[in-house]
Image: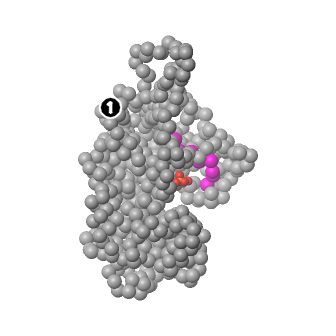
Amino acid sequence: MTDELKNSLKADDQPVTLLIIGASGDLARKKVIPALFALFCQKHLPRQFQVVGFARSWMSHEDFRNKIMEHLTCRYAPGQSCAEKMSEFLSRCFYISGQYDDPESFNHVRRELKNLEGGVPTHRMYYMAIPPFIFLEVAHSLRNAGLVGGAHEPSWSRVVIEKPFGSDRNSSDELVREMAKVFSEEQTYRIDHYLGKEVIQNLLVLRFANLFFDPVWNRSYIDHVIISWKENIGLEGRGGYFDSYGIIRDVMQNHLLQILALIAMEQPVSLSSKDIRDEKVKLLRSLAPVVEQDVVLGQYIEGTWKGVHHPAYRTEESVPPGSKTPTYAAAVLHLHNRRWDGIPFLIQAGKGLDDRMTEIRIRFREVPGNLYGHSIEFFPRNELVIRVQPDEAITLEIMNKKPGLEMKLEQTRLNLRYDAAFNEDIPDAYECLLLDVLEGDESLFIRSDELAAAWDIFTPLLKSIEQEQMEPEFYPFGSKGPERVKALAERYGITSEL
Ligand code: BG6
């Protein structure tokens, strides 16, 4: 967001009500409310605000405050001031119980909000921390209770929703169409929390605020790109959700495609959310739908990671014993445009692997007519590695003369480690995204045409996987994943370790 826009938004100091629907769930307690507390400590919330939790279980305001307190951290208010800040924040937190499918509950919400707001014009943010199959019902109930104002009213109403947005192109379109009957596109903030991560936000800066990447950022100099997402954990109680979605819908179609778009898109006309998202859509539309031959699917079986035994995916809670849902997938994506034609983008995502990390590797081509090519058997190529998490870093592998009297070459790393280079804390993605919702900046949220383009890339593949009952390759928990991925990578000349 530009400073000018930020200042104009800050000038509006109207009170805000933050209604968290599904307030007793993990997302609300562990992510959304702690992020609001962090914003409060940093003075990013308006002077007058209230956080109102809504969920099914009965609780008093005090019970709710005790429940959410557990996850508030003192990162931005160390020492004594933390206790003060916490009690000030908690005194502005309230709770309303009701049923998601009961319109009367939402009339009750309206009456309660009116009391809390004291009749003062108040902006409202509705955060749907609930399963997607009840988004629509809740949205309609909010509207019927008179809680949703028009897009251009002085007191805004904004809704925040989290993936999954449907399970393929059709169901996603349907969700978008139905939600639009209540909240217009500009009132709808579709979160992909990876876009709020610090290093991901740096991608456009790295590319467009530095000159020297520009001339080499294309098919003439880049050989391939690998985007890896790994987790060394299992389902953590989310078996029911995960088994009906699988890793492609859970991580690839959203987080990894978004990263790819930021790596490969053209420079936007400006930093406005429209211009940034226009460029992303253009990029996503030039990606060919993924084909079966370019994909490897895997599923973890029991295994041991760091001495701890983990059960097989099929024996996890709420997973059917014969499930074929992939917990790992690798795919090679092809961009049909002038900059990237012929360059493979290998993306991989897996749970139950040997590491927890997200990383982008941009591998350059061989040096042509290399003066030093004869001096080593295998001449390493330059590689730019962008480490998204953990240990955020940007490193560039370059060739150097090894100090000494002999002419010996060695690959060395230029290393920008965030913890060494910056004193600042890295904010949680939700802090940044919630601040943007409050300020009305949509650049880091998924626009409906962007969502449609992202589904087009995976929908045909997802259909074939389901129709053909494709068998995933088994890999032990804590391993590097399916063996077949090596053959897929080699087919595209990718020999580096994945
Ligand atoms: C979510 C996925 O979007 O991202 C989860 O649904 C995954 O399966 C999570 O564990 C990872 O997020 P982070 O921020 O911990 O990398």
| The N terminus lies in quadrant | bottom left
Is 229 magenta? The answer is yes
Kindly identify the residue that appears in the image at 52 percent across and 67 percent down. Answer: 77
Q: Which of the two residues, 81 or 451, is positioned nearer the viewer here?
A: 81
Q: Quadrant of residue 159?
A: bottom left
Which span is picked out in magenta?
Answer: 228-235
Is 146 magenta? The answer is no
Q: Left or right of 14: which side holds 385?
A: right
Query: In the rendered image, which residue does mark 1 sit on?
Result: 215
* Tag count: 1
Q: Residue furthest top?
A: 374
Q: Left or right of 46: which side holds 65?
A: right
Q: Which of the two residues, 274 or 137, is positioned nearer the viewer here?
A: 274
Residue 116 coordinates in the image, percent (x, y):
42, 84
Amino acid of disc 1: Pro
Q: Indicate yes or no: mark 1 CB to ligand 1 under 8 Å.
A: no
Kindly identify the residue that appears in the image at 63 percent across and 42 percent down. Answer: 354
Q: Main secondary structure of the magenta part?
A: loop
Q: Secondary structure at mark 1?
A: helix
Does residue 255 show up?
no
Q: Which of the two residues, 404 or 392, is positioned nearer the viewer here?
A: 404
Kindly identify the residue that appears in the image at 45 percent across and 48 percent down. Answer: 199
Residue 480 coordinates in the image, percent (x, y):
62, 38
Kindly identify the residue that appears in the image at 59 percent across and 59 percent down. Answer: 238
Q: Is residue 194 above or below residue 128?
A: above
Q: Residues within 10 Å of mark 1 (few under 14, many from 20)?
A: few
| The C terminus lies in quadrant | top right
Does residue 221 show up?
yes
Residue 407 coordinates in the image, percent (x, y):
52, 15
Q: Which of the two residues, 135 or 64, is positioned nearer the viewer here?
A: 64
Residue 298 coordinates in the image, percent (x, y):
59, 42
